[in-house]
Image (cartoon, rainbow, N blue to C red):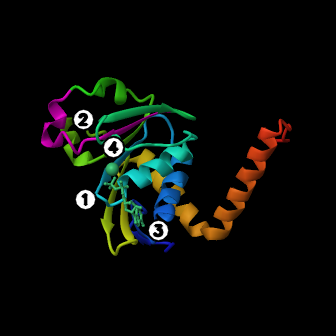
Amino acid sequence: MARGRDEGDGRLWRVRSSTPDQTARLGEWAGEASRAGDAFLLHGPVGAGKTVLASGILRGLSVPGPHPSPTFTLVRTYTGRLPVAHVDLYRLGEGAAGEDLGWDDLLDGASVLIVEWAQYLGPWTPPDGVRIDIQPATASARRLEWRALGPGGLRVLAAARRGAAAGPTAAMERAVEQSRRRTAEAEGVEEPS
Ligand SMILES: Nc1ncnc2c1ncn2[C@@H]1O[C@H](COP(=O)(O)OP(=O)(O)O)[C@@H](O)[C@H]1O
Ligand SMILES: [Mg+2]
């Protein structure tokens, strides 16, 4: 994965992903750094990879998969390390702002919010968070543009960026470590922490 380019004060980060797995991994790093009240505002055309990225974020929040697209259900809520809501406003379009999706609860600061087609949030757009624009480049390459809207957004952006900079070696080590831990759990072995 490319390390991406920094623009200005670190609030804007452009990165290229060559596979769905790389896109999901960016989400995973950001999800691991998420705190209650964080918002991920996803933009990009149909098939860009918003749901792939969302699934990575959910994994980073320790929400076991599968994470089906909320295109038809509009909202899916999960409980991982934190409560999370995955929202897809595609079907509602401009009408999303007037629809009662339980915005007061979704935005009460207790949950992490992941929104596909976030341009339709209108007045419900949270003040902080990270905006991520995904553009298809080739059949399997995507350009991702991360924009921090406030301190929370900057924290998750920086985490994704650190993950990408650490590169495949760190990711592989982590995967091996996770699989070792899972095996130990399955065998009921206590792991020293
Ligand atoms: N680098 C990439 N990142 C994300 N998805 C990719 C990438 N390359 C190919 N794809 C494919 O693009 C599609 C993205 O689908 P999805 O995440 O549902 O899009 P969206 O939610 O934006 O409509 C998937 O079929 C995925 O396998
Ligand atoms: Mg989608």
Secondary structure of the residue carrying tag 2 is helix
Sequence-first tag of 2 and 4: 4
Is residue 96 on the magenta stretch?
Answer: yes
Residue picked out by circle 1: 45
Count of numbered labels shown in the rendering: 4
Q: Which residue: 73% across, 58% down? A: 176
Contact, mark 1 vs mark 4 (Cβ under 8 Å): no
Q: Up-down: is 45 above or below 151?
A: below
Q: Is mark 1 within 8 Å of ligand 1?
A: yes
Residue 32 falls left or right of residue 41: right
Amino acid residing under circle 1: Pro
Q: Position of residue 160 (x, y in %)?
A: 51, 58
Graded by Cα atoms within 10 Å as few (under 14), some (14 to 19) or many (20 or more), the crowding at tag 1 reads few
Q: Of circles 2 and 4, which is in front?
A: 4
Q: Is mark 3 within 8 Å of ligand 1?
A: yes
Residue 19, which numbered label?
A: 3
Disc 3 to disc 2, C-alpha distance: 32 Å
Q: Up-down: is 1 above or below 103?
A: below
Secondary structure of the residue carrying tag 3 is loop
Q: Position of residue 4 (x, y in %)?
A: 45, 72
Amino acid residing under circle 4: Val
Q: Is residue 20 visible?
A: yes
Sequence-first tag of 4 and 3: 3
Disc 2 to disc 4, C-alpha distance: 11 Å
Residue picked out by circle 2: 124
Q: Which residue: 39% across, 59% down? A: 11
Q: Quadrant of ligand 1?
A: bottom left
Q: Quadrant of residue 145?
A: bottom left
Secondary structure of the residue carrying tag 1 is loop
Residue stretch in magenta: 83-99
Q: Quadrant of residue 10?
A: bottom left
Q: Of circles 3 and 2, which is in front?
A: 3
